[in-house]
Image: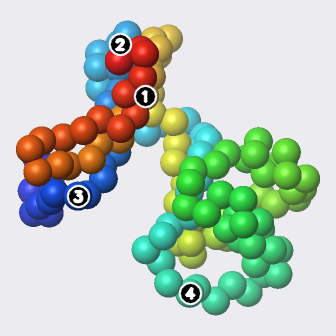
Amino acid sequence: RGRENTRMEEGEFYAIETFGSTGRGVVVEDLEVSHYMKNFDVGHVPLRLARSKQLLATIEKNFGTLAFCRRYLDRLGETKYLMALKNLCDVGVIDPYPPLCDTRGCYTAQFEHTILLRPTGKEVLSRGDDF
């Protein structure tokens, strides 16, 4: 649908994410942002707020480009960081991710697997006893 022209090639790794729901089966971004992730494509962005610089250093040290939530920052001892986090989002250094919701009152879950493309097919690296 998105007309993406990128070719998947042998030796590359991919994360495949699917979403299950007890509702209509259509998820949309809704409600207050719950998760954040550093934008790994952004280059150096000059930050004016000292608190934003400090928070970014904490994020880079503890999460790199992995997703995190505000609770994780709290556990690291960060306080009074909401304005700095908003600033990092506004300048594009951090990407905000709101929850994915379906019909009110239903349950929505995310499932993810990591695959490796081999010469003869794919290998599911995250396969466990439950799959």
> Dot 3 lies on which element?
loop
Q: Label 1 vs label 3: CA separation?
A: 25 Å
First-in-chain label (4 vs 1):
4
Residue 80 appears in view: yes
102 to 54, vertically: above or below: above
Q: CA distance from mark 3 to mark 2?
A: 37 Å
Which circle's residue, 1 or 2, is located before the other in the chain? 2
**In the image, is residue 76 above or below residue 51?**
above
Please state which amino acid type lies under the numbered disc 4.
His
Q: Quadrant of residue 8?
A: bottom left
Q: Badge 4: how crowded within 10 Å, few (<14), some, or many (20+)?
A: few
Across and down, in percent, residue 16 comes to 31, 40
Can you tell which of label 1 and label 2 is closer to the viewer? Answer: 1
Query: Which of the pair 71/120 is nearer the observer?
Result: 120
Of badges 2 and 4, the one in the foreground is: 4
The part of the image, by quadrant, that contains residue 60 is bottom right
According to the picture, the residue beneath numbered tag 2 turns out to be: 23
Circle 4 — which element?
loop
Q: Residues within 10 Å of mark 2 (few under 14, many from 20)?
A: some
**Residue 44 - label:** 4
> In the rendered image of this protein, does residue 22 appear above or below residue 31?
above
Among numbered discs 3 and 2, the one appearing first in the sequence:
3
Q: Residue at x 73, y 87 (%)?
A: 48
Q: How is the image coloured?
A: rainbow
In percent of width and height, residue 122 lies at 18, 41
Q: Is residue 41 left or right of residue 2?
A: right
Q: In the drawing, does residue 38 fall left or right of residue 126?
A: right
Residue identified by numbered label 1: 110
Q: Nearer the viewer, residue 15 or 59?
A: 15
Residue beneath disc 3: 11
Work out whether 122 lies above or below 2.
above
Are the residues flagged by discs 1 and 2 in contact, CB closer than 8 Å?
no
